Image: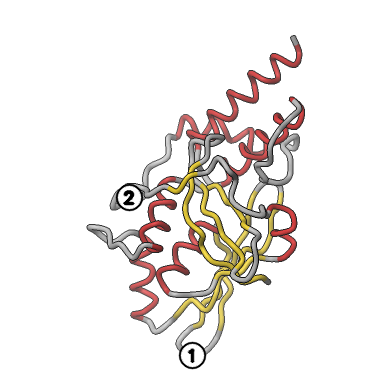
Amino acid sequence: MVLMEVSGVYTSSKSAYPQVVLKEKEGDLCLPIVIGRFEAAAISMAQNERKPTRPLSYDLAHSVLELVDARIEKVEITDLHEGTYYAEVYLREENGAVAVLDSRPSDAIALALRMGAPIYAAATVLKEAGYVRPPDESQDIDPPAPPTSEPELEPELKSKLEPELASDTLASDTVESPESEPADQLEALRRRLRQAIAEEVYEEAARLRDEISRLEADANS
C-alpha cells in the first residue's frame, strides 16, 4: 500500500461532476476519482476545516465513533474493477479489535479527513489509473456548502440507467486519458459511464449515455 494525501477536489471540462485527487505522500503519482457533488463538498469542507451549519452524515458518524471510543485506523483504496473503485475502512473498536468495512472511496476519504486517519492506495491501482499530475484541464474548486441531508435520487432516471450498469459491454477501468481516435473516445466514455452509475451520479450518467449514443450513431452512418 502507498501512503496518499488529498491533493484537492477538482472539476474537469470532460465531466459535469468533480474529482477528488489523491497524491502520493512521497511521490508524484496522482489518483483521480469521480465523485458526486455532495461528497465533493463534504471532502472539501473537511480538508479546509470548515464546519457545516448542521452536521452531515459524515460528521454524525464521526461523533458516534468518538462516543463509543472507536476510531478509524486507516482507509485503503484497494481495487479498481469494471470501472468501480473499491475501498476499505479499518475501524479499531474499544476492545482493540479491528473491523474491516467495505466502502465507497468518497465516503472513506470524507471520514478519514474528519478523523485524521491515513489514506492508502494499492500500488496496482496507482499503476492502472494514476497520473503523474492532475489533468491539465482541471481546476481547483471550492464547492458550496452541501445540504444538511443527502440529495434524493430521481427514481425514473435511475431505472433508465440500471440496464447500463448490468451491461457486459462497458470497459473495465476509469482512467480519463486523452482520446485521439473515435473508438478510444467511446471506450473512455463507457468507462466514465460505469463509474458514474456506480457512484450513483445519475445526471452525469444520463449525459454520458446520450453522448455515447450520438457517437455510435455517427460511427454507423
Residue 199 placement, left or right of 38:
right
In the rendered view of the protein, which quadrant contains the N terminus? bottom right
Say if mark 2 contacts mark 1, CB within 8 Å: no
What amino acid does circle 2 point to? Answer: Pro
Q: Residue furthest bottom?
A: 95
Which amino acid, mark 1? Answer: Asn
Select label 2 or label 1 by which is in front: 2
User: Which residue appears at 64% of the width and 34% of the height?
Assistant: 164
In which quadrant of the rendered image does the C terminus lie?
A: top right
Residue found at the far top of this picture: 221
- For disc 1, the marked residue is 95
Whole-Å distance between the Cαs marked 2 and 1? 35 Å
Q: Indicate whether 130 appears above or below 92.
A: above
- State the residue at coordinates (45%, 87%): 94
In the rendered structure, the answer to whether residue 110 lies left or right of residue 143 reads: right
Residue displayed at 48% across by 76% down: 72
**Of label 2 and label 1, which has the lower sequence position?**
1
Label 1 secondary element: loop
Image location of residue 87, percent across then percent down: 60, 62
Above or below: residue 132 compared with residue 61 = above
The quarter of the picture where residue 60 lies is: bottom left
Identify which residue, 112 or 60, lies in the foreground: 112
| Left or right of 76 on screen, residue 157 | left
Residue 146 is labelled as 2
Give the percent coordinates (x, y) of residue 108: 51, 64
